[in-house]
Image (cartoon, rainbow, N blue to C red):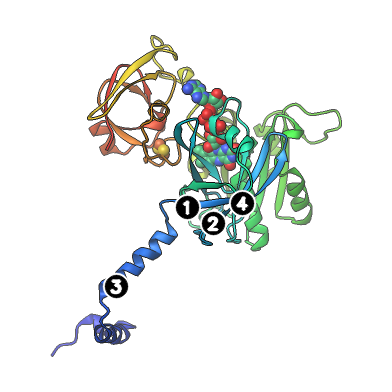
């Protein structure tokens, strides 16, 4: 009989033997499949049950929550990824993503570092109500804001604003603890020196390690402050960076940081493909965005009919996802910034505003699907949630 080509592959004989043994002992190939499924579930769990093991005050407005697993297992993550917390606060079931600030090489806990947002539902709850020993439910690690050796240069220019320092902290901690071959320039913008998160640790690291450069940039400096002032402008960056060649740019923080820094980086001649950005939530004051129809006021209220579901009202200036949650309708969500497509739903009639740049699939566009976390009603709507 002619030999099949697969019989010449390394390991062929081992597999044949394994199947023979499995059959003899009553095992099947499908039992192996189940364990593979279990393995995948462990790597990418739908939900994690986490216990707050410690709370560390970082600044007057920021705390780190140290989260350990209730079943002693935390899935691995890439430095820069986030988890979404799922909570019920004042009767509203909602979620918020938080970047993991601890380093991925230690597997005992995830740290998330939360800054207070004025009138913010979840940040104030996490900072004022959650205490040591409480249980929090989260997604598994998600997101694609991480260093990819196939795409990025070893020299990283990291631009952070406020709480946007958290993914970079995870990256820097991993780089020094695992002795990774990378050179980092971290420009970190804050309003005052008291707002700087992880300042002491970053100063210590940059003094000790030649390949980590830390440049704080303070908008309203005190008299004693001697570092860079104002915003992270191209002049501030040029003073430190000899050139922009062979460097990858990473940017993370509030919308104002992108609005100011992106044009500055582009003016330095950095092409878009060398800039990686983490979207930090839905854009604020959406009614000031290019393309927003002037005849619609942010406080205009529209009716939303859910096919085979309830009817509710939604404000024009509020993401549809938030309006649904406020009315007890839970739509799956993860990034809440238009990126992951978890919150997609179909617009059957009526119009919504979507800011430019939201990565909606071509087929979704064609069939009327939108990402509800960054969609704003401009008319009465009929929607379908699947
Ligand atoms: C990938 C990712 C990672 C993140 N990582 C971190 C992190 O590490 N640390 C961190 O602190 N944050 C992080 N964030 C931000 C975080 O997810 C939350 O957005 C933040 O904590 C604010 O949530 P909140 O519930 O307190 O505020 P929200 O209640 O969502 O309010 C946010 C702002 O919107 C305004 N607002 C609320 N409702 C309305 C409305 N109906 N109409 C108009 N305005 C309204 C509020 O006044 C407030 O100013 C991350 C976000 C993303 C997308
Ligand atoms: S939750 Fe990710 S796109 Fe809306």
The residues tagged by marks 2 and 1 sit, at their Cα atoms, a distance apart of 7 Å
N-terminal of the pair, mark 2 or mark 1, is 1
Q: Is residue 264 above or below residue 14?
A: above
N-terminal of the pair, mark 3 or mark 4, is 3
N-terminal of the pair, mark 3 or mark 2, is 3
Q: Secondary structure at mark 4?
A: helix
The residues tagged by marks 4 and 2 sit, at their Cα atoms, a distance apart of 19 Å
Q: How dense is the environment of label 4, judged by Cα within 10 Å: few (below 14), some, or many (20 and up)?
A: many
N-terminal of the pair, mark 4 or mark 2, is 2
Q: Name the side, left or right, on which 210 lies relative to 313.
A: right
Label 3 CB-ligand 2 distance < 8 A: no
Q: Name the side, left or right, on which 55 lies relative to 93.
A: right
Quarter location, residue 197: top right
Q: Nearer the viewer, mark 1 or mark 4?
A: 1
Q: Secondary structure at mark 1?
A: strand
Label 4 CB-ligand 1 distance < 8 A: no
- Which residue does the image show at 56% across and 53% down from the upper left? 79
Q: Nearer the viewer, mark 3 or mark 4?
A: 3
**Label 2: which residue?**
69
Which numbered disc covers residue 132?
none
**Label 4: which residue?**
170
Quarter location, residue 44: bottom left
Contact flag, marks 3 and 1 (Cβ < 8 Å): no
**Label 1: which residue?**
48
Q: How many marks?
A: 4
**Label 3: which residue?**
31
């Amino acid at each position: 009989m002619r030999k099949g080509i697969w019989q010449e592959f390394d390991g062929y004989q081992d597999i044949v033997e394994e199947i023979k043994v499995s059959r003899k002992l009553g095992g099947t190939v499908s039992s192996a499949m189940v364990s593979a499924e279990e393995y995948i579930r462990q790597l990418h769990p739908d939900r994690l049950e986490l216990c707050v093991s410690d709370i560390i005050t970082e600044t007057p407005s920021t705390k780190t929550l140290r989260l350990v697993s209730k079943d002693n297992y935390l899935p691995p993550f890439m430095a820069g990824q986030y988890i979404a917390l799922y909570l019920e606060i004042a009767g509203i079931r909602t979620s918020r993503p938080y970047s993991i600030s601890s380093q991925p090489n230690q597997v005992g806990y995830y740290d998330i570092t939360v800054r207070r947002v004025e009138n913010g539902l979840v940040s104030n709850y996490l900072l004022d109500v959650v205490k040591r020993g409480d249980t929090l439910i989260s997604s598994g690690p998600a997101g694609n804001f991480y260093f990819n050796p196939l795409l990025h240069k070893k020299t990283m220019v990291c631009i952070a604003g406020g709480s946007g320092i958290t993914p970079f902290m995870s990256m820097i901690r991993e780089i020094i603890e695992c002795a990774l071959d990378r050179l980092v320039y971290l420009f970190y913008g804050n309003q005052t020196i008291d707002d700087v998160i992880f300042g002491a640790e970053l100063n210590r690291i940059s003094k000790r390690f030649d390949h980590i450069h830390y440049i704080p940039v303070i908008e309203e400096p005190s008299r004693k402050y001697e570092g860079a002032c104002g915003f992270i402008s191209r002049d501030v960056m040029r003073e430190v960076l000899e050139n922009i060649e062979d460097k990858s740019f990473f940017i993370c923080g509030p919308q104002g940081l992108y609005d100011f820094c992106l044009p500055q980086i582009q003016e330095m001649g950095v092409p878009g493909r060398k800039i990686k950005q983490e979207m930090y939530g839905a854009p604020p004051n959406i009614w000031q965005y290019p393309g927003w129809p002037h005849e619609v006021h942010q406080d205009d209220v529209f009716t939303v009919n859910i096919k085979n579901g309830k009817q509710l009202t939604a404000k024009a200036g509020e993401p549809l996802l938030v309006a649904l949650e406020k009315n007890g309708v839970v739509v799956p969500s993860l990034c809440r910034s238009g990126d992951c497509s978890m919150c997609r739903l179909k617009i059957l009639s009526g119009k919504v505003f979507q800011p430019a740049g939201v990565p909606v699939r071509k087929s979704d566009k064609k069939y009327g699907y939108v990402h509800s976390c960054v969609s704003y009603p401009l008319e009465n709507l009929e929607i379908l949630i699947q």
